[in-house]
Amino acid sequence: RSTPLYSSAASDVYKRQEVDHMARKYDASSIIVLENDRDKVRNNPSMYVPDTYRLGWGHIAFEVCDNSTDELSVKGSVGSHLDVTFDESTKEFSVRDDGSGVPLEKLLDVLTKLAASGKFHNGENSAYLTTAGRWGHGLKTAVFLSKTCEFTSMRDGKYLKYVFKDGNVVKKEEGKSDKHGTYSKYLIDPAIIDSSEVTYKDIYDRLSDKSY
């Protein structure tokens, strides 16, 4: 038995939608141009995460963890540790690695430009031995979809820290440091991603699987 491609009920729905759309004036003011990457992500998060609930939250968190894992695989990296903390009451999480650290002069690009990544190079031209990602969208998505966020990179005797609110830079801090690696902390915006059902077990189980 075949399914009709057209029905009067479907037609009625279309007509109602058509009338509703026609009620709105369509002109040049209807066209919105999103000039920066932050607005692209915050206005349409479903393009960058699987959903805007528990699964989407986990996707963001694990993208950040993967990024730190990649930092540990950079050629010449002296690091071997990845630490993740999660506050089940506030849903805030942090990730720390003792890798080589992101080059400070490119840190803001790495955090805020979707097309910025050190993983576009292939083969012998790549600074990474292995990578969990390539396009660099994961870290920017975490930054842009956070209510509050901070990211610090430490290398070559210096550190550079950026603090974000609603995906915008609100503070920059720099100075001397004898450490190396990155530290970042995120509170994903609950108005965009519903994290109410995220639990410690979600984080623990996924990281346990990835540690083997």
Image: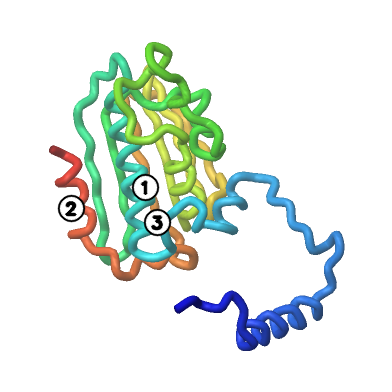
Q: Check disc 2 and report the residue beneath it.
A: 204
The answer to which of 175 and 12 lies nearer the viewer is 12
Q: Earlier in the sequence, mark 2 or mark 3?
A: 3
Instruction: Name the residue beneath numbered marker 3.
Output: 187
Q: Is residue 103 above or below residue 110?
A: above
- Whole-percent x, y for residue 89 in the image: 27, 66
Q: Label 3: few (<14), some or many (≥20) within 10 Å?
A: many
Label 1, secondary structure: give it: strand
Residue positioned 44% across, 48% down in the render: 142
Give the Cα distance between marks 2 and 1.
Answer: 17 Å
Circles 2 and 1: CB atoms closer than 8 Å: no
Is residue 28 among the parts visible in the rendering?
Answer: yes
| Amino acid tagged 2 | Tyr
Residue 101 drawn above or below residue 150: above
Residue topped by disc 1: 185
Q: Which tag is nearer the camera, tag 2 or tag 1? A: 2
